[in-house]
Structure formats: structure tokens, C-alpha cells
Image (cartoon, rainbow, N blue to C red):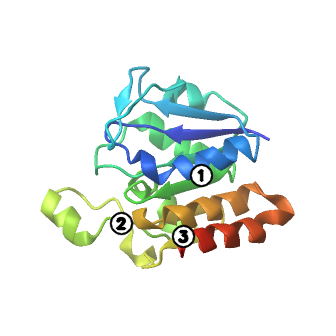
């Protein structure tokens, strides 16, 4: 089993990925690492500070990455090293999972041109921001979560569904997956 990397950038939506990483680490017993563009701490959308374990450039040198998980956050520029990491992992058919506005990075890397995806970022928001749309809208699906091959994308409000799709892909719960998924659904419906 390889490392699970989480991209952290300024104002990332940490609440969207905490359930996923809690279970990946504590149930799946995977190594989880945060990667940033530099070693400086970044402030999440919730106001908490996170310090990266490694840089995105250093992650490019690893040969044991099992997945890259990208939380949402603002629409922003993308650095070449992130594009290179995404392209490398996609070429190796490693899991690329992104939620809310996180799929923007997959879109700019060209990965979404060959996969169905979803995102919380509408065309209207892109127009208001006055930026180039990073998404190939012909492949967009207005679902809560979309899994297409090694790509999982989700709307921000679907962070529990997103987590369980990641758990299934990574076989976190093994043969107990359906039992755990139902337990969470029951809790959410109370």
C-alpha cells in the first residue's frame, strides 16, 4: 500500500476531507501526507493552520503514491509541478479524488477531458470571476459524486458520499464496506 497525499493550499476546505482522512489513516492504516507548494503553513477555510509534510515537487519524486486527494477551495492559478504530479499519477492509474472546486486542478491538467466528472463550480461562478473555465463542460454530470475509472469527483456538500466512494476505491473497509456505509447513512438521517 502506498501513501495517500492531500493537497493543501491557502483557504482549502478542510471539512470536506477530514472524514476521508480519518478513516483512511485509522481504519485503512495508510500513510497520509499533506503536500503544499512550499513548507509554509497555510490557513484553511475554517481558520486552522496546516503545515505540509512535503512539497508537491517532492511528491513528484515518490514512487509509492496510491492516491492524491484534493479538497475544494477558491478558484486559483495552478503551478506546473501540480499539473505534472496529476498527469504522472493519472498515467500510473492512481486514484485522483477531488471535491467541490478541487476538480479545477484535474481539469487544468487535462485529466477531465477523458472522464465524466462533477464539481460545485458553476459556469456562472466562472463568469463572475472572469477567469478561464478549467472544466471541459461536455463531460460534466450534475450528480453528487462521480466515479469514472481512477477519478472520483464530488460536489462540496457530498463530502460523506465522497469519502465512502474513496473508501470503496481504496478498499478501506474490505467486506464491511456496505455495513459501514449504512451505519453512516443511519446516523446522517437521525
Say whether residue 116 is visible.
no
93 left or right, relative to 153: right
Who's the residue at 40% across and 60% down the image?
A: 100
Q: Quadrant of residue 21?
A: top right
Q: Secondary structure at mark 2?
A: loop
Who's the residue at 40% across and 77% down the image?
A: 138
Q: Which residue is mark 1?
A: 20
Residue found at the very far front of the displayed protein? 190
| Label 3 environment density (alpha carbons within 10 Å; few <14, some 14–19, many ≥20) | few
Who's the residue at 64% across and 58% down the image?
A: 166
Residue found at the very far top of the displayed protein? 39
1 and 2 marks in contact (CB < 8 Å): no
Q: Secondary structure at mark 1?
A: helix
- What label does residue 188 carry, if any? 3
Q: Which residue is mark 2?
A: 120
Mark 1 or 3: in front is 3
| Label 1 environment density (alpha carbons within 10 Å; few <14, some 14–19, many ≥20) | many
Amino acid at each position: 500500500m502506498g501513501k495517500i497525499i492531500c493537497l493543501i493550499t491557502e483557504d482549502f476546505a478542510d471539512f470536506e476531507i477530514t472524514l476521508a482522512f480519518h478513516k483512511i489513516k485509522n481504519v485503512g492504516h495508510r500513510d497520509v501526507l499533506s503536500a503544499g507548494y512550499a513548507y509554509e503553513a497555510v490557513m484553511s477555510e475554517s481558520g486552522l493552520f496546516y503545515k505540509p509534510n512535503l512539497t508537491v515537487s517532492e511528491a513528484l519524486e515518490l514512487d509509492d503514491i496510491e492516491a492524491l486527494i484534493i479538497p475544494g477551495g477558491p478558484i486559483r492559478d495552478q503551478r506546473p509541478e501540480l499539473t505534472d504530479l496529476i498527469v504522472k499519477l493519472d498515467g500510473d492509474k492512481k486514484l485522483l479524488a477531488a471535491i467541490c472546486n478541487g476538480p479545477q486542478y484535474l481539469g487544468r491538467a487535462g485529466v477531465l477531458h477523458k472522464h465524466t466528472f462533477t464539481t460545485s463550480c458553476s459556469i456562472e461562478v466562472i463568469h463572475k470571476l472572469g477567469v478561464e473555465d478549467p472544466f471541459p463542460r461536455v463531460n460534466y454530470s450534475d450528480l453528487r459524486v462521480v466515479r469514472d475509472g481512477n477519478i472520483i469527483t464530488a460536489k462540496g456538500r457530498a463530502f460523506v458520499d465522497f469519502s465512502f466512494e474513496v473508501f470503496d476505491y481504496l478498499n478501506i473497509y474490505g467486506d464491511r464496506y456496505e455495513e459501514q456505509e449504512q451505519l453512516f447513512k443511519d446516523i446522517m438521517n437521525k
